Structure formats: structure tokens, C-alpha cells
Image (tube, grey):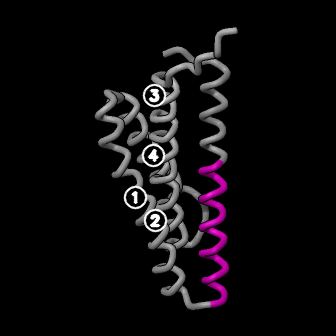
Amino acid sequence: MQFDLRSMAEHMGGVAWGVVFVLSVMSIYWFSKKVLNEKTAFFASLIYIASLQMAVQFLQPALVAVRRHRQLVVAWVCGGAAFGLAFLIPLEPIDRGVLAQLVGPVATLVLELVALHRVITMTAHPVRQPRS
């Protein structure tokens, strides 16, 4: 697999957006946990988590259609690993569960989006310059 500076920047940009999304949803969860009760905050965070999981499932057939099976498997394995590693963070048990349910799909979604973006940029037609 060829790894150049542009693909590294794409991965780092995707990871940065993923981290921003996880931190924003977890801060909303912890804030609503303090303001509201814990059950309401938990169910509100499940809305974000369900939308992430739907996005992951939505992109899977797209990657299969463009024959990126290997990247799809890598995305799912990395998402599963991130899910499992999130339980090692020293938080309350419910908070660890919410964080794991958030980190796993975000990792999978970021890797799927990067793989799909690379396919789109590889197949994009170059812009023709007008003849002078």
C-alpha cells in the first residue's frame, strides 16, 4: 500500500474531525447529565450514536460497490478495536459504555469516508484547460 503525504493528511483530517465529534457529543452528554437526570442524558446520546451507526451502514454498500473490501474490513476492525479500548478509560461504567458506543462507529465512519474519498479523487476526471 502506497502511503504519501496527501493520504496521511486525509487520515489525520478525518481523525481530527472524529475526535472533535466524540468530544462534542460527550461534553453534551456530561452537561446534560448534570442539568437533567442520567437516564435522559443517556437516551439523548443514543440518538447521536444511532445516527452514526446508520451512516456506517449506509457507506458499507458504497465501498463494496467500488471494490474496496479490504479498506472496509480494516475500518470495521479498527472500529471494533476502538470500541474495546474505550472501556479501558477510567470513567463511570455508563459513561464508558456511552463513550465506547460513540468511539467505535466514529472510527469506522472516518476510515470509510477516507477510503471513499480516495476512490472519488482517483476516478475524478482532470479539469481540461482551454486551448490558447
Proximity of marks 3 and 2: CB atoms separated by less than 8 Å: no
Tell me the quadrant of the picture where the C terminus can be found.
top right
Q: Nearer the viewer, mark 3 or mark 1?
A: 3
Q: Position of residue 66 (x, y in %)?
A: 33, 30
Question: What's the magenta region?
Answer: 17-35
Measured Cα–Cα span from mark 3 to mark 2: 27 Å
- Say few, some or many: other residues with alpha carbon within 10 Å of mark 1 (under 14 / 14 to 19 / 20 or more): some
Q: 35 or 88: which is nearer to us?
A: 35
User: What mark, if any, has residue 108 been given in the picture?
Assistant: 4
Disc 2 to disc 1, C-alpha distance: 6 Å
Label at residue 119: 3
Earlier residue among tags 1 and 4:
1
Dot 4 or dot 2: first in sequence order is 2
Q: Amino acid at mark 2?
A: Ile
Across and down, in percent, residue 80 comes to: 41, 47
Q: Secondary structure at mark 1?
A: helix
Q: What's the residue at 40%, 58% (across, down)?
A: 53
Q: Amino acid at mark 3?
A: Val
Q: Earlier in the sequence, mark 3 or mark 4?
A: 4
Q: Nearer the viewer, mark 3 or mark 2?
A: 3
Q: Earlier in the sequence, mark 3 or mark 1?
A: 1
Report which residue position mark 2 lands on: 49
Please rate how many residues cluster around mark 2, counting C-alpha atoms within 10 Å: few if below 14, some from 14 to 19, many from 20: many
Circle on res. 53: 1
Q: Nearer the viewer, residue 113 or 80?
A: 113
Q: Secondary structure at mark 3?
A: helix
| Residue 29 spot, x, y in % from top left | 60, 75
